[in-house]
Amino acid sequence: MAKPWSGPLGALAISTTMVVSMSGISDTQASCGSANCFLITGTQEAMNNPGEVTLDFSFRYIPQNRKLEGTQEVGEVLTPMVDFENGTIVPDDHREISTLNMLMNAAFDIGITSRVSMGVELPLYLDRQHEHFDEVGTPEETFTNADGTTGFGDVRISARVSVLSAMKDLLTLGGGVKIPTGPYKLLDSEGSINEPTIQPGTGSWDPFVQVYYDHQWVPHRWEYFLSAGYVLRTTNPLEYDFGNLTLVNVGARFSPNNKVIFSLQLNGQASPHDFFNGQMVASTGSRQIELTPGIMVFASSGFGFYAHVAVPIYQKVNEAQLAPETALAMGITATF
């Protein structure tokens, strides 16, 4: 009997969540603007054989300088400042210019049994370069590009269970938790706690669930996939609560031979407003859809190299915010 998921598409699945465990390419978080990647790379979605380990190293480049109010482009984005020291929100304190997010991530998956896999994701380095004007509308209004941050992010631990594994179909259910390992109290250029969305970490323990389905309608050549996830974001010790995140992905892959896989996917995400001390934080939360073409190339050594380009096709932000432009995710993966 042939092994389920054999061939290039099967090798891709067997060697493999969402990049990055809950993986649209950019998760826009809030007023000052930061983004992360949430797309299906095809390197971690499925189940490893018992004892089999998949390693994935990725880099993401996400420029965030599109000024939006709702769905409309505007010439100016004014956002509030979260004053952690005094427990208040100062409206329209910042005039946002841009944020450039550069992220390096490592992911490790291991097969525990034929139906259970576990994974760990390490955000090795997050570099958020941010430009804005402070204290807008006052005599002290100043431009600064010194309020970005760098550092290690929040680790994710996850597990996946194969509910269905047949010749053409794969269905997995998973879940886990994001652990607050990244700094979330870094100071800005004026010595105050920086904006929460600029920090490498969130300071909160955030459980998540996910489901992934894959069907090969032409075995070893064509397949389509669907996934959905939900992140329950909890309140951190600074009394800041990021809005919960909903993720939906749908796409298809085509393998013309055993070396190359092309993919095209739609990545949707939605999150409501954030809250601080029980107060709603304006200019947080959004709904976005990205169209993401991608390619993976397998070397003779067994390593896979992939690249994805996420093009925003729908963006609706609450109030006014910076939104991502076209973003890039690329990486290397191997299974041992």
Image (tube, grey):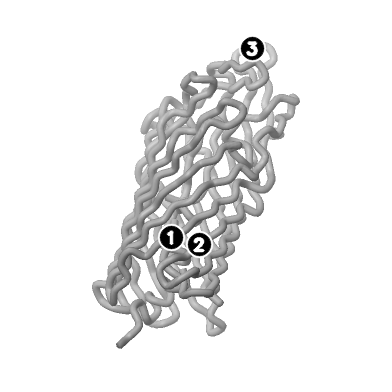
Q: Going by the picture, which residue comes out furthest to the top?
A: 139
Callout 1 amino acid: Arg
From this viewpoint, is residue 81 visible? yes
User: On the rendered image, what quadrant is the N terminus found in?
Assistant: bottom left
Left or right: residue 61 versus residue 18 is: right
- Residue located 44% across and 52% down the image: 175
Q: Give the x, y percent position of residue 255.
A: 36, 76
> Alpha carbon of mark 3 to alpha carbon of mark 1: how far?
53 Å
Q: Of 130 and 183, which appears nearest the observer?
A: 183
The residue indicated by pointer 3 is: 138
Q: Nearer the viewer, mark 3 or mark 1?
A: 1
The residue indicated by pointer 2 is: 118
Please determine whether, in this image, residue 335 is positioned above or below residue 285: below
User: On the rendered image, what quadrant is the C terminus found in?
Assistant: bottom right
Left or right: residue 79 versus residue 219 is: right
Asked if the residue under mark 2 is in contact with the one under mark 1, i.e. CB atoms within 8 Å, the reply is yes
Q: Earlier in the sequence, mark 1 or mark 2?
A: 2
Please determine whether, in this image, residue 142 is positioned above or below residue 119: above
The residue indicated by pointer 1 is: 160
> Alpha carbon of mark 3 to alpha carbon of mark 2: how far?
52 Å
